[in-house]
Image (tube, helix red, strand yellow):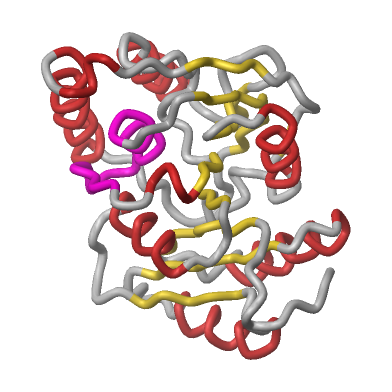
Amino acid sequence: MPNPSESAAPALSVVVPTYNERSRIAELIRATFGVFAASGLDGELVVVDDNSPDGTGAIVEALAGEIGPRLVVVHRAGKLGLGTAVMEGFLASHAPIVGVMDADFSHPPEGLVTLHAAMRDTGADAVVGSRYIPGGRAENWPAGRLLLSRVACMVARPLTPVRDATSGFFLIRRDRIEGVRIAAGGFKICLELLMRSPVRSVAEVPYVFVDRTTGQSKMSLREAAGYLTQLRHLYALRFLGPGRRKRIDYIREPAGIMRG
């Protein structure tokens, strides 16, 4: 991996929101920087911790002293919502391309290189890791949760051409989100940004989502209800507000399958 100075901007900044992720956060950080090194990608990792009671933030702080300025830690006062954590992470990042991934290996670190290459090759404003285009899928999910996920994506289709609009694994150009204000505190931040930012083109790349094997899922009835409220606001924006004139060009980029 390049040995960047603090003044040199990285090529890619990836935000990882955390809450009680101590079991694998060190492993994820080391794996991600290993991927950056192997690919020659000058990457930055921004961990945003919501005051995890299990000490996740302290673990990341210790690693930051070892890894250096490319590992940024943001400590928040409490559990304030995934969407706002992502936006705070973007503000603390330094690259012209920013992205999001989970802390539990549901999203494969090596997939970041594939997403970055797809953005470079297509010129898209955003690139989404997709479970629901050919080559993508979800593993270790019960049938009920898979059905709910499919329905959640289906009801968002009138808003955006993206097949996996609820994906939490994506990259977006910084200049497309500067000044954007989100209205959702929940975890469908990809859909929120696609609708509220001036993104004009988006590509989708297949990947294999592997459900967490340790810790607890962040999915809850409260999050599901929040998604329905979010959809109501975004439908109003799309069909009644200034967003009604927005068009997003869809670029299909069937690059190599990414596996978590």
Residue in the image at 27% along x and 44% along y = 186
Determine if the magenta segment contains residue 184: yes
Left or right relative to 64: residue 172? left
Magenta residues span 180-196
Residue in the image at 69% along x and 21% along y = 253
Residue extending farthest right = 38
Name the foreground residue: 58 vs 173.
Answer: 173
Image: 235 above or below 211: above
Left or right relative to 108: residue 169? left
Give residue 91's quadrant in the image: bottom left
Percent x, y of residue 12: 63, 56
Determine if the magenta segment contains residue 195: yes
Residue in the image at 43% along x and 18% along y = 248
Q: Quadrant of the C terminus?
A: top right
Percent x, y of residue 124: 59, 30
Percent x, y of residue 17: 44, 59
Left or right relative to 124: residue 51? left
The image shows a total of numbered marks equal to 0
Percent x, y of residue 164: 48, 22
Left or right relative to 179: residue 31? right
Q: Quadrant of the N terminus?
A: bottom right
Residue in the image at 54% along x and 78% along y = 60
Name the foreground residue: 197 vs 50.
Answer: 197
